[in-house]
Image (cartoon, grey):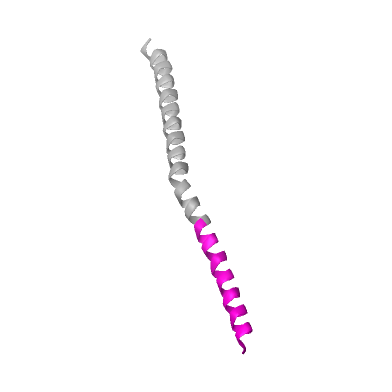
Amino acid sequence: MNLLQVLNEIHRALGEIRHELGTIQGELVEIRRLSYRVSMLEQSQSWLKGGWAMLAAGCGYLFHGMYVR
């Protein structure tokens, strides 16, 4: 192997490393956004729980009115 082939091999290896580092960086950005997504899901879940609680309370009030008389 001559010097030019060695340099080309090093250049190719560095290109592959740069590509892998870019992939890792993209995954890290997505991991940072994960907490925001989880927060949004938790907020939606709390709204749904509240909605079901209000629906149950309303049904309880209606059935209570029917059976008290």
Q: Quadrant of residue 22?
A: bottom right
Asked if 25 appears above or below 37 in the picture, the reply is below
Quick one: quadrant of the N terminus?
bottom right
| Magenta span includes 9 | yes
- The residue most toward the bottom is 1
Q: Which residue lies furthest to the front in this view?
A: 3
Q: Residue at x 44, y 21 (%)?
A: 59
- Spot occupied by residue 19 in the image (x, y as percentages of width and height): 57, 65
| Residue 61 in picture, x, y percent from top left | 40, 17
Quadrant for the C terminus in the image: top left
Q: In this view, does 1 lie to the left or right of 51?
A: right
With respect to residue 6, does 46 lie above or below?
above
Residue 64 position by quadrant: top left
Residue 38 rendering spot, x and y as whole percentages: 44, 43
Number of on-image labels: 0
**Residue 17 within the segment the image draws in magenta:** yes
- Residue at 59% across / 83% down in the picture? 6
Vertically, is 30 above or below 2?
above
Q: Which residue lies furthest to the left in this view?
A: 68
Magenta stretch in the rendered image: 1-25
Direction from residue 4 to residue 24 in the image, left or right: left
Q: Who's the residue at 53% across and 55% down the image?
A: 26
Residue 13 vs 6, above or below: the answer is above
Camera-side residue: 59 or 27?
A: 27
What's the magenta bit mostly, secondary-structure-wise?
helix
Q: Nearer the viewer, residue 2 or 27?
A: 2
The spot of residue 41 in percent (x, y) is 46, 39
Q: Tell me if 18 is positioned left or right of 66 in this view.
A: right
What residue lies at 60% left-to-right and 85% top-to-bottom?
Answer: 3
Q: Could you say which is closer to the camera, residue 65 or residue 11? A: 11
Image quadrant in which you'd find residue 63 = top left
